[in-house]
């Protein structure tokens, strides 16, 4: 009996953590951006930039794989709707009525649970004690971060409308995590994302135009430009490439659990960006969350023939 690390899991771990580091700033940026643009408009700008950014890297593969996309159009339509258009619009809508930390907490708690359960049901990923322990520890770590060790804080916690939007966003991203595994054979990762980004942008376009003209006008300035570039290039193109690659290497459930790192990483960033104090409960939360991830990704013993 010999215990060893699976190389794919090691690489997948690095990819997933890097994606979470990029995404961890999303909720702070989204909370600030609501003053500049409505949620649909912001999502439209994000995915327009992501589509343009991905185009030169994916266009040749897309031309070769065009027939495969036509044959599987319904799959790409629903993936773009759930994982691109709805997911991120819900996040930006949540920013109007809840805090950045609540956005990170709810989004990061819901989607690993949804992904793990759907993966066990739809793509036959094993739901074992390590998966369950990883989820439980991840949620415990997030609760410690939220409550700062005070039970009374949890007992008096009130769910705002924005929190409900984040729960919906978590369900969307958990579903996306699972169905990435059902990507049609023969389609490359970059052309896959190009098509999802483009369809998501098209779906958002008419609603964004309506929102800009009748609900919330857009304040075009350098701040909005930098935010849109950060969301479109970093949070979309780069992070989605990393995350999808991690899913293909480790599976939906294992990868989704890394999302529980995002609130912890956000609190680290707040230390440097917002000059917030780093407290004891952030350390405890980080230890619990990382323990859950280590348990879930730790290799099982395998027998070697003699």
Image: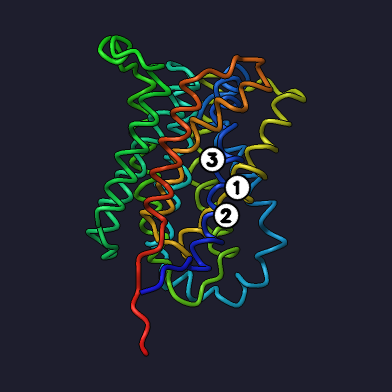
Nearer the observer, 305 or 109: 305
Q: Quadrant of the N terminus?
A: bottom left
Disc 1, SS: helix
Task: State the CA–CA distance, disc 2 to disc 1.
Answer: 5 Å
Residue 192 in the image, given as x and y percentages of width and height: 53, 63
Q: Which residue is mark 3?
A: 205
Residue 218, numbered circle:
none
- The single residue placed furthest to the bottom in the displayed view is 306
Q: Which residue is mark 2?
A: 15
Q: Quadrant of the C terminus?
A: bottom left
Task: State the CA–CA distance, disc 3 to disc 1.
Answer: 30 Å
Query: Which residue sits at x=53%, y=51%?
Result: 16
- Residue 188 horizontal side relative to residue 150, left or right: right
Query: Which residue sits at x=60%, y=63%?
Result: 190
- Quarter-of-image position of residue 148: top left
Cβ–Cβ under 8 Å for marks 2 and 1: yes
Query: Which residue sits at x=56%, y=70%?
Result: 188
Q: Which residue is mark 1?
A: 18
Residues packed near mark 3 inside 10 Å, few (<14), some (14 to 19) or many (20 plus): some
């Amino acid at each position: 009996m010999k215990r060893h690390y699976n190389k794919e899991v090691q690489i997948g771990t690095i990819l997933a953590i890097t994606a979470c580091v990029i995404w961890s700033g999303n909720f702070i940026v989204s909370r600030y951006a609501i003053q500049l643009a409505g949620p649909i408009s912001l999502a439209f700008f994000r995915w327009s930039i992501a589509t343009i950014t991905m185009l030169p890297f994916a266009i040749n593969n897309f031309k070769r794989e065009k027939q495969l996309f036509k044959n599987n159009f319904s799959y790409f339509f629903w993936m773009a709707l759930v994982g691109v258009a709805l997911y991120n619009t819900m996040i930006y809508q949540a920013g109007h009525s809840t805090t950045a930390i609540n956005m990170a907490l709810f989004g990061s708690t819901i989607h690993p649970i949804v992904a793990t359960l759907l993966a066990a049901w739809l793509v036959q990923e094993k739901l074992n004690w390590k998966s369950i322990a990883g989820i439980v520890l991840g949620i415990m770590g997030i609760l410690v971060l939220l409550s700062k060790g005070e039970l009374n804080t949890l007992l008096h916690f009130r769910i705002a409308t924005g929190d409900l939007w984040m729960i919906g966003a978590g369900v969307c991203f958990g579903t996306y995590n699972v169905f990435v595994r059902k990507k049609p054979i023969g389609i490359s990762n970059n052309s896959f994302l190009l098509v999802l980004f483009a369809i998501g942008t098209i779906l958002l376009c008419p609603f964004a135009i309506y929102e800009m003209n009748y609900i919330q006008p857009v304040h075009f300035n350098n701040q909005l430009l930098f935010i849109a570039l950060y969301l479109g290039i970093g949070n979309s193109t780069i992070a989605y490439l990393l995350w999808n690659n991690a899913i293909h290497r480790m599976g939906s459930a294992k990868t989704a659990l890394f999302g529980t790192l995002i609130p912890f990483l956000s609190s680290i960033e707040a230390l440097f960006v917002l000059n917030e104090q780093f407290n004891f409960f952030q350390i405890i939360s980080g230890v619990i969350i990382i323990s859950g991830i280590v348990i879930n990704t730790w290799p099982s013993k395998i027998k070697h023939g003699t």
